[in-house]
Image: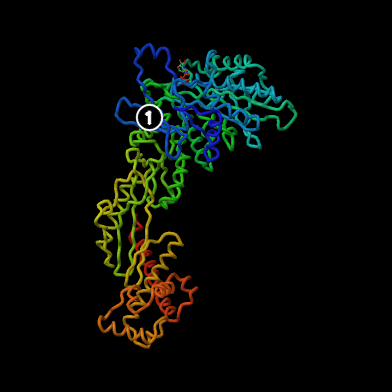
Amino acid sequence: MDSPTPDSARLRANLGSILGRKVRIVGKIRASTDLEIDSSNGVLAPWISVRKSDGESPESVTISFGDQSTSRKDTYRLDYCYEQDEGADQIFSREVKPMISGIFGGLNASVIAYGARGSGKTHTIQGSDENPGLAPLAMAEILSTSEEVGRLVTMSCYEVYQDHVYDLLEPKEQEVLIMEDAEGRIQLKGLSQASLTGVRVNTIAEFHKFYFHGCTSRKPAQKLTNDVSHRSHKGLIVHVSHNNKDSDTHLVGKMNFVDLAGYEDARRKSNDGPHLVETTRINKSLYALQNVIYALNTNEIRVPYRESKLTRMLQDSLVGTNQTLMITCLNPYFCQDTIHTVSLASRSFQILNRLCIDSTKKIKTGARPMAFCSPKIGIPKTPSTSVKKHNSQWHAIEKKTSGVPSAMKGRKLFDGAHPIISSKQDVFLLNEHSNLELATGNEFSATLTLLEDNNTEKENNSSLVNEGQSPPLSARLQELSNSLKSLCASTPLNIKMQLEGGNSRNSQVCTDLAEPKTPTVEHSLRFNDNWETATIGSPREIFNMCSSGLKNSLVQEYVRFLNSASKEELKKLHGIGEKRANYILELREESPEPFKDLNDLKDIGLSAKQICQLSLHLGPIEDADAAKLSWQNKCTIDVNRLTLRRNQKAYMNFGNSYRTSKLGHL
Ligand SMILES: Nc1ncnc2c1ncn2[C@@H]1O[C@H](COP(=O)(O)OP(=O)(O)OP(=O)(O)O)[C@@H](O)[C@H]1O
């Protein structure tokens, strides 16, 4: 994989916020440990493959896992993925360093390490003496910049254990209280140095002393519970502030580093008793964080910060234009939990792509823009009811999807919400259709077009899963199809179902759609005896359709007039004098209907130009008005307008009664 330059990384880092996605999501494959290398006997089969995404999002990468239990190969998309041989220094220079200037410019930043247990989160954030992690590297940079510009740097360390926050620098039994001031800033009462007067960090050595001591010492919560296992989220806050402590605007910016507790499937047998409670609470807070990231990336109006203490603490760093980087750490060898964490991370990444794809597809297909699902349905809510339930929900998604897991939820067939589509491959082009044509006599026809998947890259399509209560789309489509058929059979109006023949793909309602696209109902109107079917779309299309319908009607009226009018009536027409009128009568003697269309007028000596002018007179209404139609043509237009209105009215009446009587129960 090509290494991007720092500049391009900065560009990429800003790309999300420019296009609406606030949290950048990258992966990091942990390097193999000595133990793993030794136990592998030199055979280390790569389990994760990373390839650059193409198409609409060339900056992103696609991750796939060599699933050992099945031949299935799921793919997940992230902004980028750092491989095993890429260390914290590379992540720092490409991702974190560009964020630091923002802190001195008044922004907050957050770097969050997320992943399964043992996936290298602590190593990435904290590192070791030989290989410093992102936090020490950032601190060195912050210290050197603050020296140049004269800023004060302070730090705080905390842990979140079972949704309780404890200070790590000055361990005490009291919890840290999370409060919000009038300006929306989060105040952490009881957290040492959080209120800008804290531990002054002058040197990186001092930082190491505080940080490593804070992160490795016996935790207050651990002392309280006497719990040996003790898995918790650990956070570091680096505050950059003005030297002038009297100033109200003392704080300039802050940077958060969060080493999340590892995700672990709570259903694992080893999880019993207190471990199950611990795992459950950890997973609950991880889901809460994912909900927040998802909501941020989807620009949801309500971001569920209050679902966990951690998200509440980070609230003022995640909002607005603040910068957030989520590093999804990946176990380099088979680990089901890693797949799960990547699938969750990837879901929040997909949002931007959905947005972009949807807007382009809108142009191509005329489909309505997608409305994004609420994360409360797309992403599991806080697993307050049961983590097991959430897990099974998610595993179910993994089983059902053949590609990128997507935000999915059950929808009513005709509701306003649109499905979320997880990637370009998952976008359904909506041009194949099955037509159910209903005709009532010769009054009108209504075409219900059900759109089906026309994806050219079908192997990558996700089967979007209906997680809600409503039945799957295929069932609803089938139901609709059956209802229309029964309507067809039972209607007293002699409505007949007409399935378009010829193309077998068109001849049936597609019931195996992977994911719903709200079916579009296309209406067809017919005008006068020479039925012409046109599709109604935008107001402009409706107008054009009406105009073209009128034009054809006028042409037909004109030729019918030529075929039947008396000599005197013919002579009143523009361009027809005594000679032409006689000639028309002669032609009519030879054939009762000598004129079928405008081209036949050549037979009576009208030049192409004259016919063209005539057709202009018979053109769309504005053309006709502009050309000051002759009295006869105006009369004809009036007649046709009346016909059009009558047809439209009949159509509306039918539509209303049809909807009320037959579609209501759908
Ligand atoms: N880049 C690396 N190079 C070598 N060893 C690594 C690297 N990253 C992680 N390790 C080793 O992998 C093991 C797990 O790493 P780490 O503790 O960082 O994982 P974690 O995700 O924080 O685990 P947990 O979820 O239990 O907190 C450790 O022994 C660590 O030393």
Which is nearer the eye, 264 or 518? 518
Q: Is mark 1 within 8 Å of ligand 1?
A: no
Q: Which quadrant would the C terminus be assigned to in this image? A: bottom left
- Residue 589, position as x, y percentages in the image: 26, 84
Q: Is residue 490 above or below residue 83?
A: below
Report whether 315 appears left or right of 449: right
The x, y position of residue 420, in whole percent, is 42, 43
Q: Is residue 660 above or below residue 459?
A: below
Q: Position of residue 134 (x, y in %)?
A: 55, 22
SS assignment at label 1: strand
- Kindly identify the residue that appears in the image at 32 percent across and 71 percent down: 530
In front here: 397 or 1? 1
How many marks on residues? Answer: 1
* Colour scheme shown: rainbow
User: Residue placed at 46% from the left, 32% from the top?
Assistant: 287
- Mark 1 crowdedness (10 Å alpha carbons): few <14, some 14-19, many ≥20: many
**Badge 1 amino acid:** Ser
Is residue 455 among the parts visible in the rendering? yes
Q: Quadrant of residue 564?
A: bottom left
Q: Nearer the viewer, residue 172 or 201?
A: 201
Q: Quadrant of the N terminus?
A: top left
Q: Residue at x 53, y 21 (%)?
A: 89
User: Where is mark 1, residue-wise?
Assistant: 64
* 263 over 505 or under it: above or below: above
Residue 386 visible (yes or no):
no
542 w.r.t. 151: above or below: below
Residue 574 rendering spot, x and y as whole percentages: 42, 81
